[in-house]
Image (tube, grey):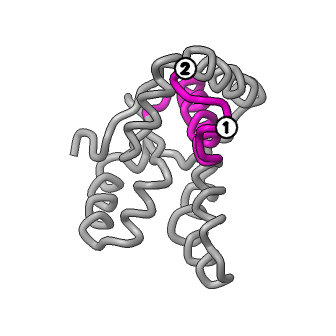
Amino acid sequence: MRRFVLDTNVYIAADRDRAKADELIAFYQSFLPVTSLHAVVAQELLLGAITAARGSAIRAAYIAPFASRRRVLTPSFASWARSGEVIAELVRKRIITPGGFARSFLNDVVLAVSCREAGVTLVTDNTADFERIARVAPFECIPPWPLT
């Protein structure tokens, strides 16, 4: 059965828009048992929590349910190393320029290569960045919402 990881932008959209939250809930109703949280996504969600209350809310809503079930995907050393190779290859092939990308793109590369390594499908609205990554490191990436 297909397994999923949701990108940070999916959670942010759900947090900001009730309709998107309802879409996330509908997805969870069908696919929660085969969905994991990625450690990079947890980091990105928490770095936006500039108050203690906001951090607690993010942990309770998005992180704790996965952590308590030990369904957090953490990049391996091989994924971290591969992410550097992917970025170098993207520069060599002139898909990106050296220093011409946001720091968040580095996280996206780690996310992509570790999803591939784990055999999970990434669900994201950030198709532009992930399509660039897939040009040198193919992985399964789809827009919201699969099979709902």
How far from the left and from the top, in percent, is residue 134? 47, 23
Mark 1–mark 2 distance (CA, rounded to whole Å):
12 Å
| Kind of residue at badge 2 | Arg
Residue displayed at 27% across by 40% down: 146
How far from the left and from the top, in percent, is residue 45? 58, 62
Between discs 1 and 2, the one toward the N terminus: 2
How far from the left and from the top, in percent, is residue 110? 63, 35
Front-lying residue, 37 or 78: 78
Q: Quadrant of the N terminus?
A: top left
Q: From the image, tell me which residue sits under label 2.
A: 94
- Disc marking residue 12: none
Front-lying residue, 48 or 77: 48
Residue displayed at 29% across by 63% down: 20
Residue displayed at 56% across by 77% down: 57
Front-lying residue, 44 or 84: 84
Q: Dot 1, crowdedness within 10 Å: few (<14), some or many (≥20)?
A: few
Looking at the rendered structure, the secondary structure element under dot 1 is: loop
Q: Is residue 131 magenta?
A: no
Q: Is residue 120 magenta?
A: yes
How far from the left and from the top, in percent, is residue 19? 24, 68
In the image, 22: left or right of 120? left
| Kind of residue at badge 1 | Gly
- Asked where in the image residue 59 lies, by quadrant, the reply is bottom right
Q: Which residues are magenta?
A: 95-121
Asked if residue 89 is positioned above or below residue 63 in the image, the reply reads above
Front-lying residue, 58 or 60: 58
Q: From the image, tell me which residue sits under label 1.
A: 99
